[in-house]
Image (cartoon, rainbow, N blue to C red):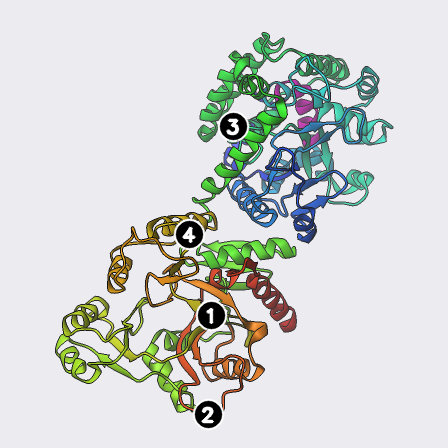
Amino acid sequence: MVELDEIGRQIVKNNYTAAFKAIGWQVDRSWKVSSSFSEGNIDKEKLGNIEKSDYFEFSEANDTVCLSSSKWSSKKTLREEMMLNQYLLQKNIGFRDVLWPLSIVKKWAEPNCSGGLKIRIQLPEDLLIGLYKNKFKQLKIDYIFFRNQVYMKMLQQFASHRWLLTYLTGATPFEGTATKPVRSQSECYAPTITSLADSVLYHSLKDYLKSDYCKQAELVDGVKVGSSLDAENEMLEKGIHYLEITHLDLDPFSTLGISNEIMDLLEAMAAFFIATPGIRNEDLQKILKGKRQLDQQIACENPFAISKCQVQARQFINKLSRFVSEAGLSELENSLNKIAVLCSSPTETPSTKLLRGQGSEKIDASALRLALDIKKKNINALAGIVGKLDSNSRLVLCSAFKLGESFSIVSLPDKLIKVGDTMLEAGIQTEKNSGIMQKLWANRELSKEIVAAAGYDIPTGWIISSIAEAKNVYQEVQGLLIAIKSSHLPGVCVFRVPPTRGAFLQTVKKYLTPEYPCIVEQVVVGSNYTALIVGGKVISLVERIPQNVVGDGRSSIEQLIQNKRAKRESLQSNFEFGKFQAATLAEQGRTSKDILPRGVQLYLRYDASAGTGADYFEVLTETNHSCLGKIEQLAKILKMNDGGLDVIISNIYQTPNGEENQFVFLNAHATPCFSEHELTLLGKTQHPADCIVKNAIGSNEHTK
């Protein structure tokens, strides 16, 4: 059995061990930003465009970025937040730049390291109150004094075990032109600094705060007590609020810069230090001085050598493992088992792995490889968190991050996110859009009837509910150019030549379902456009150009398709080529092996619905204001505050004069695809999601 003190015995007696799982966490992570090209410069303009916020800060002087926790969270929630923020940061700085995976040591600077970790741990207030009421209140001890003493006990123990964290996390083997590797250059301090730390008294918060050299102690011991109050001396009256691990080297092998195992270790250490006997007051200063000397030896030792702390480390981790087992914290055991292996194998610690992986390379080249690998891992790891979220919501989250607004994922299955105090579904829908109207927009035929009643042109159409009806409709559409689609579901098949009876019936069967009828529409001559509506206004109008390739006079159609697919994949967009596209080629008398003449555009399909590999060309600034006014009037008729409208416009440069089919309504979308408006032709990258965020924040402020 692990020996417990009075607090530990009260925890066991009152079954408070579960409270350890409610420890609050905050983590600040800093990285130097580097170009992914060895001789390149970082894009400071993009970094400068990201607003400073509670969770992000960019230092132009040092080329460093910091991601901070904005609130206290559970360990699981925190790691998800860390992953999301890191992903959004990387998306905003672009593909050229990476987060440097190593803390960069600057000796004798303040601070002495660019890039690293700060970790704050907050004990559950319910645990402290429960302990106080059940035992310590009876001893006539003030509650704030009691809470301070618990945190001071943890502070003493973390300070006396800093050497263990240095051994396990040290990952800065070199500094400047140094040729002899050490475990952690960022942890190596001048003797004058450590001697100043030795003079700081840790017996009580009062003794600790009155010392002139607290800052040196915080630096050397890597831990301090903290408060949400502006003045530290207010802690005496109102109490310590948390403990902060003031600096750790970034873990170059962890996507987040800190591993699960180290976070689990810190949780286990916090619980252990609370529940077991602390350091006796008469021995405290002597022990802390000795442990600081050990920490400096560990920091400065050769990472490949047998460490001076191996025996102590194994003994402590074994004791810690017994404690978590007896305390019912079994979820920490696996991590402690892995750390026990590291305590016996210094060659597997971060500094040693870094040096071993470096091989004959310079450390900068090796680190750049790691940075690129972490960037890729981060995107892949995010699939479990954000990958299930729709693309619209991802774009809105990226914009919210850039604009410095608060955000969160509310529900992945329901596509719900929150920006400020506004709830968004699929990145756009707010409470301002009626649920009834959203159902109406999904019913293509019904929305057309409402628009037609308001005097707008719509395509001539037929509704088919059975194959028998389809045979009759064919007699009416025979010889016409038509489009066939479902009344509710996405997708459309456009015939640029009148279909045969067999092709017509086969296509109807594809879109006809027992729940929803099929719609046949006569094709209207003109260009197809999609308008993105935010706050009742058109913020983007793109021309939809069906999936196509353009010849260069040298490449086969197959090669052109492969080249365009590779480009789309780099933008996380699709460009499929299957039976449908092959049939379209055959209709035009082409094969995939044909060489397409330079400048010739070849359509692979004739519709430009979402997800079909279409191109999009932004025309908002070129479009006649009266055309935009008609689109916004359409939105009013359909009671659409946010959404998308598909229209055909014969000439966007002229005012419609009332002639037939100059302006034709096609569809309304409750959740339009933002990516169609984000990446457009001629290399234009737009940010419609910025408007979504600003509208969401502005709408919320307006209602306050």
Q: Position of residue 637 (x, y in %)?
A: 47, 84
First in sequence: mark 3 or mark 1?
3
Q: Nearer the viewer, mark 4 or mark 2?
A: 4
Residue 268, quarter of the rendered image: top right
Report the amino acid beneath label 3: Glu
First in sequence: mark 2 or mark 3?
3
Report the amino acid beneath label 1: Glu
Looking at the image, residue 135 lies above or below residue 308: below
Q: Is residue 141 visible?
A: no
Circle number at residue 658: 2
Identify the residue shown where x is 56% and y is 58%: 685
Looking at the image, residue 93 lies above or below residue 498: above
Answer few, some or many: residues within 10 Å of disc 4's Cα (few below 14, many 20 plus, some between 14 and 19). some
Side of 239 relative to 316 (left or right) = right
Q: Secondary structure at mark 4?
A: helix
Q: Nearer the viewer, mark 2 or mark 3?
A: 2
Residue hosting label 1: 543
Circle number at residue 261: 3
Circle number at residue 564: 4
Q: Nearer the viewer, residue 261 or 693?
A: 693
Q: CA distance from mark 2 to mark 3?
A: 70 Å
